[in-house]
Image (tube, helix red, strand yellow):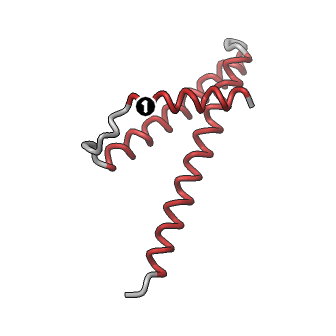
Amino acid sequence: MDVKITQALRGYNATKSADLSGNDTGGNLAGTAAKDFAETLAKAETVAQQAMTGNADPHALVEALANTQLAVETAVTVRDRVVEAYQEILRMPV
């Protein structure tokens, strides 16, 4: 649980430094999020491969897996919210 809190704080600090003034388009923000997600998965895969060969610290593997879990849970939550919004739009009378 401590790892999740640490990761959440890192994520919060990263968003504080981002430009959220409204000048950025939503597409660019979504593209950046997708890029970060892919980088997180790639890093976890690399660390897992290194751990299997004995070249990585077990702590690094646990941290990479926690980051990946957090990223996947976030992506699933965003997807669910988008689907829910789409379904709400479909229910609107014309």
18 up-or-down from 54: above or below: below
Estimate the x, y position of residue 60 in percent, counting from the top left. Answer: 67, 18
The residue at the point 49 percent across, 27 percent down is 13
Q: Residue at x 37, y 87 (%)?
A: 94
> Which residue corresponds to the image point at 49% horizontal and 61% vertical from the top-left?
82
Q: Quadrant of residue 58?
A: top right
Dot 1: element: helix
Residue that carries the numbered disc 1 in the rendered image: 16
Classify 81 as above or below 4. Answer: below
Q: Is residue 55 above or below residue 86?
A: above
Decide: is 57 above or below 72. Answer: above
Give the class, few, some or many, for how many residues have Cα within 10 Å of label 1's Cα (few <14, many ≥20): few
Residue 33 horizontal/vertical position (percent) = 44, 41
Q: Residue at x 52, y 32 (%)?
A: 11
Left or right: 16 in relation to 43? left
Report the amino acid beneath label 1.
Answer: Lys
